[in-house]
Image (cartoon, rainbow, N blue to C red):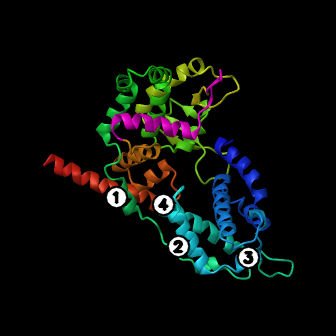
Amino acid sequence: MNVIKIKDRQELDKKVPLMPWYVEKFINFKLPDLSPSSLLEYVRDYDTFFSYLLAEGLAEGPSVKDIKLEELERLHMDSIDSFRMFLMTRTEHTNMRVTVTRKLSSLRSLFHYLSQIAEDEQFYPLLKRNVMAKVSIKRTHKPKDTAAKLEGKLLQEQEIDEFMAYVQRDYENDVASNKQAIYSYQLNKVRDACIISLILHSGLRVSEVVNLNVEDIDLKKKLTYVFRKGKNDDTFKTPVYFRQEAVDQLSAYMSIRDTSYNAPKREKALFLAVANGKKEGSRMTKRAIQEMVIKYAKRFGKPYLSVHKLRHSFATDYYLRNDIYKTQEQLGHASPETTQIYAHLTDRTMAEAIDHNT
């Protein structure tokens, strides 16, 4: 079972009862088609919107749960424009354009369901007037634009080797005066190098890495089995290949996993950490892996490097050696349009290589 999905489903079950009854109806309608993680994002977006309505006096409340459908029907476009501006300008947790667009898209989905699909006992739509139908949501980024933003922020072939060498050896020199950092590094360097190598040589998402169990790794076939994003079938894991370069790191880590992290026999997770105050290792969290990569990246001199950019680094290199469809399958993209990012990135990479060799 997907660990992240289990946690998100538990969180979803806690938050939905705090929403108006019609939101719960919408979530139940979407549950067969969307993952708990996606639905949890929906609910968080609705909580932000409903809280805004209460704060601005656009709904009486007294709580989010008490907001009536009639209050949604009375909303003007000015109210939606003001909400959009609120998201973009509030001093705390200011949202990027892509986040604002996602929140508005979440609202459109809810309002569309209430006005076009859900019915009352007389077969009339639950929502008589849909203000969100008037909201135009522009595509926030195209593959070419995304590629432009990533340019110069990924690891090229030589840099991949240099970064791995830094994680395995050179980082220790940079923190030599910090006893706590040295202790943590010596304890975790094999694990950390293994995680980074696996992502750089397979393109796995951080959520896929978090969910890996020991039994999911086949070193002989160079295969790992993962729950792919967007697929709700928790009985099937997708086989994903990793390169030979990751084999040594995986072998080294798996040989010390049990002893270094005092792994309980019941613990199936591949990547472990020992939390403060605990004696036994447990599954690493998504945040822990992200912070670990950032820690090394900053010292390496590439503070913009993240787990996702490691995935992009692999994908760019992989695309140079394969076609778009193989790259799409390796990365688990639902659409080849997403994979086109790497077509634009590799155009630049090949142009630079030609200039370099002439």
Assign a secondary structure to mark 2: loop
Task: Tell me where residue 123 sits by quadrant.
Answer: bottom right
Q: Residues within 10 Å of mark 4 (few under 14, many from 20)?
A: few
Q: CA distance from mark 1 to mark 3?
A: 43 Å
Q: Are marks 4 and 2 in contact (CB under 8 Å)?
A: no
Task: Tell me where residue 50 sits by quadrant.
Answer: bottom right
Q: CA distance from mark 3 to mark 2?
A: 23 Å
Q: What amino acid is found at the position of numbered circle 2 in the picture?
A: Ile
Q: Report which residue position mark 4 lands on.
A: 96
Residue 345: where, in percent of width, then height?
Answer: 33, 55
Q: Split into 4 quadrants, where in the image is the N terminus?
A: top right
Q: Which mark is residue 334?
A: none
Q: Which mark is residue 148?
A: 1
Q: CA distance from mark 4 to mark 2?
A: 14 Å
First in residue order: circle 1 vs circle 3:
3
Q: Which mark is residue 137?
A: 2
Q: What amino acid is found at the position of numbered circle 1 in the picture?
A: Ala
Q: Report which residue position mark 3 lands on.
A: 71
Q: What amino acid is found at the position of numbered circle 4 in the picture?
A: Met
First in residue order: circle 1 vs circle 2:
2
First in residue order: circle 4 vs circle 2:
4
